[in-house]
Every structure is written in structure tokens, then in C-alpha cells.
Amino acid sequence: MEKINTPIRHTTIKEQVYETLKQGILSGAFQPGEWLQEAKIAKSLSVSRSPVREALQQLLGDGLAVNVPNKGVYVKKSTTKDMQDIFEVRMCFETIGIQKSAQNLTDEIREELRGIRENLLEHYETGDKESYINEDARLHKVLIKLSGNQLIMDLSVRMYTMEHLSRTTSLYSDERFRQSVEEHIGVIDSILAGDIEKALAYNSRHLNLARDESLRQVDEP
């Protein structure tokens, strides 16, 4: 286990431990399949084992960890079925958001989309994939927000958390990086122009290609 340097900003010890472990998993400090040893984590963070145990239970609920009977809690390894399920749900949720964009597109969201567009192009031009990925995630959260459906917004939190690492690795290919920026700009421009069908086509292409790349990543040894 690598040293964890996540700053603590939460109110309870359990929340502090949970956020530290979650960020450790998402950043790769904890590798897929790694044993999250309760005693070792407690010692590393200078806390008792009780808040660690509670945090591990929350990670299990998030789908970021799995409990192996008689062994312990391990960082979840994504499977082909996981990726297929995630992208199927993403397609449903984001399609609803785009379909409802005409009625839910406020001036504030318009400005947010324009800002994301500018940032995506800038990060692509400079080859800053990490910053690009952050804007990528921000855009898809806006698509969810456009649904105006609080239940969809709540359910999407876990979905995007589980898909985070896949989204990161799916841009390793320079060709996929180029395709991605074209798809994202197409989605944004189409929504701003009120062309729902075109936005849906761009986003469908984007999600299908991202899914295929993610499945290839999962299949690699």
C-alpha cells in the first residue's frame, strides 16, 4: 500500500477515513484486487479500527470494494459485465438529459457548457489528459443535470464513481483522445444550437466508443 496524502476536510473520523480510502482507490494508490487491511489502514491513518471498519462498509456500498468471505475487503476489479452495465445505464440517463435539454437549458448551464468547451479544447491542444478527463466528467454531469430528475442525479453519483478509473484509462490512446474531443464538442454545440437529434448521435457514438475502449482495458491481463 502506497502512502496516502489525501487532506482531511470532513467532520467525523469515519468520514475522514472514508474519503481518504475512496480517493486512494480512485487515484490508483490502492490497486484493483489489493487487500484493504483494516489494522494496517488504522495504523497508517493513526485512528482506531472502528472508523476504518465503517468506512470499508461504505466502500462496499459504493461498489468500489468487495468482501471476500473469510479473507477480507479488497479493491474491486472491474469486469466486462461491470463496464457493459455502467455504459448501458449512462446511455439511458444521458439520453434523457439531452432530450430534456431544450426545456432545462438555463443561461447558467449555457455558460457552463461554453466554459467546458473552451477547457476541453485547451487541454486537448496542450495534451493535458488529466485536466481533460476532469472536464469530460464535468460535461457528463451537466448532461445528467439537464434531465431535471433528482433521482437520476442521485443514482448517477455511484455510477460515475465506479466508472472513474475506466474513464481515465480510456484516453491513453492518442487516436481515442482526438475522437473524444470531437464527440464532446459535437454534443455541446448541438445542445446549444437546440439540435437534439444531432446531440444524441454524437453522445451515442462517444459512449459506444468509450465503452469498447474500456472493455479492451478490462480484458487486458
Image (spheres, helix red, strand yellow):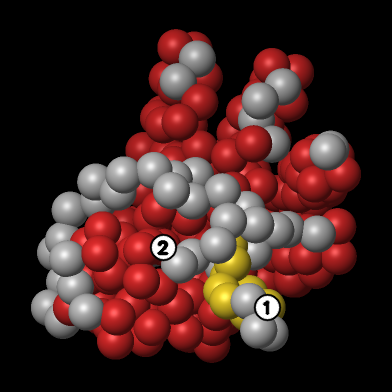
The quarter of the picture where the C terminus appears is top right
Where's residue 158, x and y in %? Answer: 54, 73
Identify the amino acid type marked 1: Val
Q: Quadrant of residue 80?
A: bottom right
> Is residue 149 found left or right of 122 in the rendered image?
right
Tell me the tag on residue 209: none
- Is the residue marked by circle 2 packed among few (<14), some (14-19), or many (20+) residues within 10 Å? many
Residue at the spot x=50%, y=26% of the render? 129
Vertically, is 37 above or below 206? below
Depth order, front residue of 221/200: 221
Residue at the spot x=24%, y=46% of the render? 5
Tell me the tag on residue 22: 2
> Is residue 106 found left or right of 49 in the rendered image?
right
Q: Nearer the viewer, mark 2 or mark 1?
A: 1
Residue at the spot x=29%, y=87% of the render? 50
The residue to which callout 1 is attached is 68
Vertically, is 89 above or below 78? below
In three-dimensional space, the C-alpha distance between marks 2 and 1, rounded to whole angstroms, equals 19 Å
Where's residue 100, x and y in %? Answer: 61, 71
